[in-house]
Image (tube, rainbow, N blue to C red):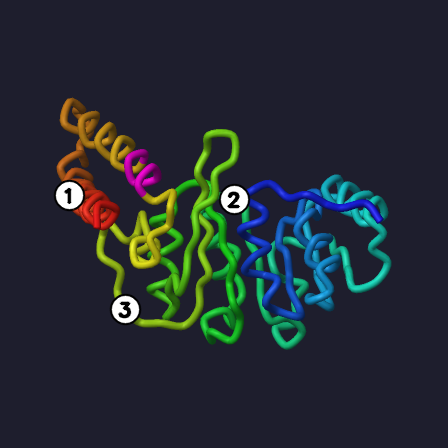
Amino acid sequence: MKDIKLTNRLAAIAAYAVNFERVADIGTDHCYVPVWLLRSGKVKQVYASDINKGPLQRARETAEEYGIKTGLELVLSDGMSHLNPDSVDAIIVAGMGGETIAGILSASDWIGEGRHALILQPMTKTEELIRWLHLNGLRARDAALAEDEGEIYLIILAGPGEPKPSVCELYVPKVLAEKRDPLLGKYLDRQIRRITSAVEGLKSSRAPNKDVRLTQLEPVLEGLIKMRGEVEYANCE
């Protein structure tokens, strides 16, 4: 049977999801992760959904190509409206902006109960997603970084937890430093460059709210630089 090879980003997502028997993949697109999970033999049921018919057709073609005949349910759905919370153990929402992921999660009031593992991969606005998790009694219990074609992606495993993240931890979860993720230094460098550029742009801007935004971003930059120094020190030990 033909083997399915995942990109590093998708493999990192699958590495979390493979620990659960019943998984939902929201916005599945080509369905590579659901197919890989079912081929692993550890995941028994995957609900793969998308808001558009085109991605679901591609998902169906992927399932046929790799011989998936049972355990996969393809659903045309907006967000998680199709899900019965008792039918899944883990939920994947990946490849979208952090604010979009937060919006999808917030539409289901049972998410805040913390009964499900959330495997989240924001493409942008990570801080909005992590802030939403905290406000709803959830946190990044684990996280990983994956690099594909020069881009570094953050994958979050979220669940119940109360510790409030610092302002810089809204951008880079502390657990990445605790586990010494090998890509953390490079990821921090990129975050620092991005926030530095934003701060410098604001300082030369005439926007009426620039002082408020600077007050928000300058502590973030300070925290990220401190975290980068701690990572450098740890690597020298």
Residue 172 higher or lower than 114, as above or below: above
| Residue found at x 73% / y 60% | 38
Residue 163: which numbered mark, if any?
A: 3
The span shown in magenta is 185-190
Task: Name the residue: 85% across, 48% down.
Answer: 64
At mark 1, the secondary structure is helix
x and y, in percent, of residue 31 in the image: 70, 48
Mark 2 vs mark 3: give the one in front: 3
Of the residues shown, which amino acid type is indicated by label 2?
Met
* Label located before the other in sequence (1 or 2): 2
Task: Report the amino acid beneath label 3.
Answer: Pro
* Camera-nearest label, 1 or 2: 1
Q: Are marks 1 and 2 in contact (CB under 8 Å)?
A: no
Q: Earlier in the sequence, mark 1 or mark 3?
A: 3
Residue 160 percent across, percent down from the top left? 41, 72
Q: Quadrant of residue 58?
A: top right
The answer to whether residue 220 is visible is: no
Q: What's the mark number on residue 96?
A: 2
Q: Quadrant of residue 229?
A: top left
> Which residue is under mark 1?
222
